[in-house]
Image (spheres, grey):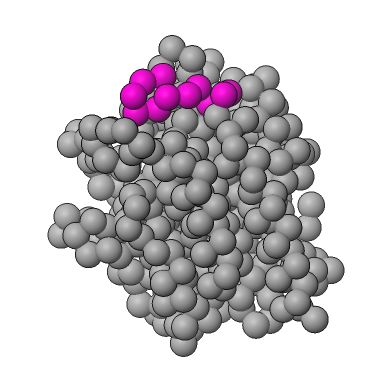
Amino acid sequence: MDKLKISENGRYFINADGAPFVWLADTVWTMPQRMKWDDVEYLMQKRKSQGFTVLQIVALDPERDVQMRSPAGDAALLYDNLRAPNEKYFEYLDWIIDKAEEYGFYVLLLPVWGQLVVGDDWAGGVFPKTVTEENAYGYGEWIGRRYREKKHILWCLGGDRQPVHKGVDYRNVWRRMAEGLAKGVLGKALKYNVKDPAWEDLLITYHACHEAETGECSTLSYWDGEEEAWIRFVMLQSGHGLLPKNYELVAKEYANSHVRPVWDGEPAYEMMITTFPPVDESYHGTWMVRRRAYWSMLSGSFGHTYGHASVWCTIGEKERSIMTQYSWYEALQSEGSGQMKFEKSSRCHNLWIVQT
């Protein structure tokens, strides 16, 4: 597979031959922990048939299992130590990443989920802070070196957390990890705030949360876009609920004087609840999925990410509940995911117009 690059006008991705790349992603965040090998293949076959081109995956995600075990039961870290990654666990992640390439998918890979940095989850749980300013560089270098030959990987730091979380500034943790990735992938000692052409060869973004108190939800919400040389493209999380208008969010970033590609990387998931506890018709239906996708496209995003409430966390048959009514297998057949191919077709046409 070709390594993607950013177009000369800074608005979208292109292949090696200069043709625009159409980004249609699925959020399969927990795949390495929750999905066994034959199910991984089934999902990839299904999403390929539906026109998807990118899979968004987390290497270390504790949301469904704090030990972050593979389907075979291998914990991701030995002794819960970031400096002691378990080779058995990462061999399975290797297989997933290779299989994605075999099916023609690019992978947006998050080295860690934000919970491991800030030490709390959205349900009020408190945990040790696994990723710190002291060990972030070493892990970034390690995982970057592991996948340095994989041209189909793009990188994403963050993981559903703002870099300033509950008044604590974690920006240096993420900066150190970005510098570690540069060392591992490129073999170069780059500084997060020093512009260097080499950063252009390492496509990194940051996955913020949708901050309820402020409405902030952009990669750049708590970063100085001019100073952070490592941030190459901008991710929005327009999030769940009926009120966000992602065309306004995309347009705001599109107008930024420091031009970067922008897209809504985590909009409202299909069949995600809109209120808690759920009441009648309080789930995101296909109309919401379609609306966010077209709003995003028509306001200037380079692509779109789809999500389903049961797929991102790989809900099993016995785990269905009022919160997640379908198994992940059933959800793959959802109306919304099947309709994404029409948005993709429209986006292909729009990118062709932009290029010509």
- Quick one: 53 or 293, which is closer to the camera? 293
Position of residue 215 in the picture relative to residue 95 (left or right)? left
Q: Name the spot of residue 27 as percent of width and height, x first.
A: 52, 42
Identify which residue is drawn at 67% across, 67% down.
13
In the current view of this chain or complex, which residue is farthest to the right? 17
Q: Name the spot of residue 340 as percent of width and height, x first.
A: 64, 48
Viewport quadrant of the C terminus:
bottom right
* Image height of 92 relative to 298, above or below: above
Q: Answer whether residue 213 is visible to the viewer in this image.
A: yes
Q: Overall secondary structure of the magenta stretch?
A: loop
Q: Answer whether residue 187 is visible to the viewer in this image.
A: no
Instruction: Give residue 215's quadrant in the image.
Output: bottom left
- Quick one: 304 or 349, which is closer to the camera? 349
User: Bounds of the magenta span?
Assistant: 320-330
Q: Name the spot of residue 128 as percent of width and height, x first.
A: 23, 36
Position of residue 96 in the picture relative to residue 319 (left or right)? right
* Image height of 188 relative to 319, above or below: below
Identify which residue is drawn at 30% across, 69% down.
222
Q: Name the spot of residue 19 as percent of width and height, x first.
A: 80, 69
Instruction: Give residue 200's quadrant in the image.
Output: bottom right
Instruction: Give residue 98's quadrant in the image.
Output: top right
